[in-house]
Image (cartoon, rainbow, N blue to C red):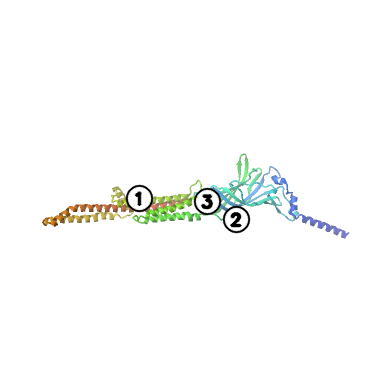
Amino acid sequence: MAILLFHIFLIFANTGTLFAENNCSIAKLLKHLDIIDNKTLLWARPVNNWDEPLVVGISMTVDNIVELDGKSQSMLSMVWFDMAWQNSFISWNPEDFCGISYISIPLDTIWIPEVYVYENINEDVSVKINFLNVAYDGTISQSKPWRIVSTCMLNARKFPFDTQKCSITFGPYVHNIEEVVMRSIFSANELKEITLAHYINRGEWELLDIEVLDENLTFGKNLFSKVKYTITLQRTSALYIINLIAPAIFLLMVDFGSMFIPITAGERLGVKVTIVLGFSVLLLILNDLVPSTNSTPILGVFFTLCLLIMILSILGTIAVLHMVEQSTNHRKIPSWLQTCLFKYLAKFLSVDTNCLSEKKTGQCSNDLTDVSRAQNEVKEEWKTEQESHEVRLLKMLHLQIPAIRNHLEKASEEESNKAQWLMAALVIDRLLCILYVLTVVVSMTAVAAVWASN
């Protein structure tokens, strides 16, 4: 009898072991869950009561901002998207299936909430992950990389020192808030910490902050749930400083240095025109790099000011060269211009004009004194000497002395006019140089203050 009972015990033990081994198969679990070819699991929203909304938790981790295009007002971002919800139709006890706590099933096996990106403007070409993770308690989760091309309204006023905020909003496309409710899995602080730890800065944008907010959208008579992520990005400005701002400042310095070229040399105008032509190349580069927005970029104002200063400097150089040209025509400088330049402006600019009065009164008076002395000597000779051949020559010389005197007076006047025109050009040139420095300092300070303002 004892031997019989022992055999019966062995038979039941072997049967239990075989049953346990069979339950360790995924196929047995799938058959137990009745997932394969079950249209109810595929079509029905997985809630026990039809008026009960399904809560879907989502999370987005930004891996990289590949591009933020100012021309098309779009942002290309690579994100890792996670979504989880509870399926009331699926559950099992892991102890009955050798401790199996989760399985992976194809996407087209059970019902999945549709998720729509509100700002999306391009077809989804992300890598397809065709499986879901199903936990023993009915929790369904999906994780996938997502390449999102979304709209982003840029404000390029402070370009290239700008900070942009772009939004990515997830929400259902078909089900309203009475059927599906979207909620963020992580809080704002948790999401920021996770995102900053995983973000890879491989472009010109640096991630500063990311915020998440659960919102509702009213569309017609329906109310839809959505989760909005706001990404704060700062542009890396080193590239634009090296390629645009620094060359513009260098050209401005060279243009200012060209003002020290002598005004009588003639090369100053050619140098300034060449600098403007070089600056036009930077304007072409600027046109390709500055984003197209409604706001006027400060960088554009900066380049416009630089170009305006260079153009005004060229016009001033033309005016100075015109005065130098007038000095060769022996024309007299207008009296009002003499008063403005030599009496007031020259004194204000600390320009020494004493050489003009000395040259005018000194050399000319000496020459005329010599001529008068020669004329008096000729008259004395007439009185003391008899009429002879030499006397006749002296008489002829006496007749020519007024002409010589007039010639010397005219030459002295022409020399004085030339000196006055050159001095006027010198005064105007110094005025332009001072105005150049003041204009550059004031305008660049104003631009820098606007760039630095919030």
Q: Residue at x 47, y 49 (%)?
A: 300
Q: Residue at x 39, y 52 (%)?
A: 436
Which is nearer the N-term, disc 1 or disc 3? 3
Find disc 1 in the rendering and name its residue. Answer: 319
Checking the image for residue 27, the label placed there is none
Measuring from the top left, give residue 333's x and y in whole percent: 29, 49
Q: Secondary structure at mark 3?
A: strand
Checking the image for residue 198, the label placed there is 2
Q: Residue at x 36, y 51 (%)?
A: 318
Q: CA distance from mark 2 to mark 3?
A: 21 Å
Binning the other alpha carbons within 10 Å of mark 1 as few (below 14), some (14 to 19) or many (20 upward) gives: some
Which is nearer the N-term, disc 2 or disc 1? 2
As drawn, the residue found furthest toward the left would be 386
Q: Secondary structure at mark 2?
A: helix
As drawn, the residue found furthest toward the right would be 1
Measuring from the top left, give residue 72's x and y in whole percent: 54, 47
Find disc 3 in the rendering and name its residue. Answer: 163
Which is nearer the N-term, disc 2 or disc 3? 3
Q: Residue at x 19, y 52 (%)?
A: 402
Q: Nearer the viewer, mark 1 or mark 3?
A: 1
